[in-house]
């Protein structure tokens, strides 16, 4: 069995990576995360209009590409590698909730807008909501109902990771319209969220390893590159092993979700738990193996560290994912 991306999936990853390399370097990421919207609108437009990232898993009948969640996960991995702030995760959660529990009318009305790149978000509970302060479409799970929310106000809230945009939603004066089955939407999002976070964590882990390897080739100590020291080689080899195990787990989870596999929940919980812990460890190793330069504001290592730990707060920390497994 060949466990690898198809030719089309590889081309998708390569295309997204090329776009991010041009429009989401370190300076662009920092500028976007501190901007009024928290993301680069021009980059988001390029990703949606030229690559179609928001439309990948949406059916063709609703102006999507008719692919699967797996293709979305491929894109999320690349976004995780670049640390690019983008509202894709929020829009994916809203779209998946709609596809799982929305009425035919709601799907026909809202999914084409999401596929075109309008920012959407999903509310489930009272905590901060992803990208809520600039979302054009707000969907909420209220008990057993899936509802569309209009007229709510949102206030940006500070977070440890500035590249993940959060806002507190005030629905006091908002109106809601029932658009579907909340239980079905919640069941789907309960798996899509951790799987998406796992993909982001794999991309982050790949970035941490690449940064560390590149630096070990450049930094000279005792007359030789530090990458030639056996002790550091072993640590980077361990980083590579963790990355590849995490990527395999993430792909397996995303594929199970894309094909409605019977073991989807176990694979998702396992992948989320492992990938989050691996990302935190690799981000820490990146700082350690860079030495003093990595604790400066100018270096990107702290961005990796913040993102690694913030991801574990979105849909459950590793130990919480393991606790949900019925083993």
Image (cartoon, rainbow, N blue to C red):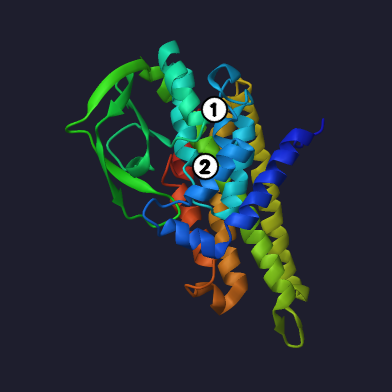
Identity of the residue drawn at 26% across and 23% down? 176
Rendered-image quadrant of the N terminus: top right
Residue located farthest toward the top when viewing the structure as drawn: 104
- From this view, report whether residue 220 is shown above or below residue 51: below
Quadrant of res 240: bottom right
Element type where label 2 sits in the image? helix
Q: Is residue 198 visible?
A: yes
Along the line of sight, the residue nearer the viewer: 22 or 184:
22
Label 2: how many Cα within 10 Å (few below 14, some 14–19, many 20+): many
Along the line of sight, the residue nearer the viewer: 6 or 295:
6
Earlier in the chain: of badge 2 and badge 1, it is 2
- From this view, report whether residue 64 is shown above or below residue 205: above
Marking on residue 76 = none
Identity of the residue drawn at 68% across and 51% down? 18
Element type where label 1 sits in the image? helix
Image coordinates for residue 79, horizontal then vertical, percent: 58, 48
Instruction: Measure the alpha-carbon separation of dots 2 and 1.
Output: 14 Å
Q: Is residue 278 visible?
A: no
- From this view, report whether residue 62 is shown above or below residue 276: above
Marking on residue 265 = 1
Horizontal side of residue 143 vs 239, given as left or right: left
Image coordinates for residue 16, horizontal then vertical, percent: 65, 45
Marking on residue 197 = 2
- Count of numbered labels shown in the rendering: 2
Along the line of sight, the residue nearer the viewer: 160 or 235:
160
Q: Are marks 2 and 1 in contact (CB under 8 Å)?
A: no
């Amino acid at each position: 069995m060949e466990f690898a991306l198809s030719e089309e999936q590889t081309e998708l990853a390569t295309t997204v990576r090329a776009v991010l390399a041009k429009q989401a370097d370190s300076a662009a990421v920092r500028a976007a995360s501190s901007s009024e919207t928290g993301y680069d609108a021009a980059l988001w437009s390029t990703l949606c209009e030229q690559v179609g990232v928001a439309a990948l898993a949406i059916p063709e009948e609703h102006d999507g590409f008719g692919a699967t969640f797996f293709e979305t996960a491929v894109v999320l991995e690349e976004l995780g590698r670049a640390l690019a702030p983008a509202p894709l995760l929020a829009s994916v959660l809203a779209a998946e909730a709609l596809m799982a529990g929305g009425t035919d009318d709601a799907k026909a009305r809202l999914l084409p807008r999401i596929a075109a790149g309008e920012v959407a978000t999903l509310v489930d509970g009272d905590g901060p909501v992803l990208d809520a302060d600039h979302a054009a479409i707000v969907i909420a799970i209220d008990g057993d109902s899936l509802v569309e929310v209009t007229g709510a106000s949102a206030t940006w809230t500070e977070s440890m990771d500035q590249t993940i945009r959060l806002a507190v939603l005030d629905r006091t004066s908002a109106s809601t319209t029932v658009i579907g089955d909340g239980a079905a939407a919640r069941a789907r999002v309960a798996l899509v969220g951790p799987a998406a976070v796992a993909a982001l964590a794999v991309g982050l882990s790949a970035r941490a390893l690449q940064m560390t390897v590149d630096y070990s080739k450049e930094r000279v100590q005792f007359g030789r590159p530090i990458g030639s020291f056996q002790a550091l080689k072993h640590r980077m080899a361990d980083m590579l092993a963790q990355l590849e195990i995490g990527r395999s787990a993430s792909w397996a989870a995303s594929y199970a979700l894309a094909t409605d596999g019977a073991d989807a929940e176990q694979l998702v919980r396992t992948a989320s738990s492992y990938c989050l812990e691996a990302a935190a460890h690799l981000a820490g190793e990146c700082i350690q193996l860079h030495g003093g330069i990595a604790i400066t504001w100018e270096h990107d290592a702290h961005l990796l560290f913040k993102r690694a730990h913030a991801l574990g707060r979105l849909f459950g920390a590793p130990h919480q994912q393991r606790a949900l497994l019925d083993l």
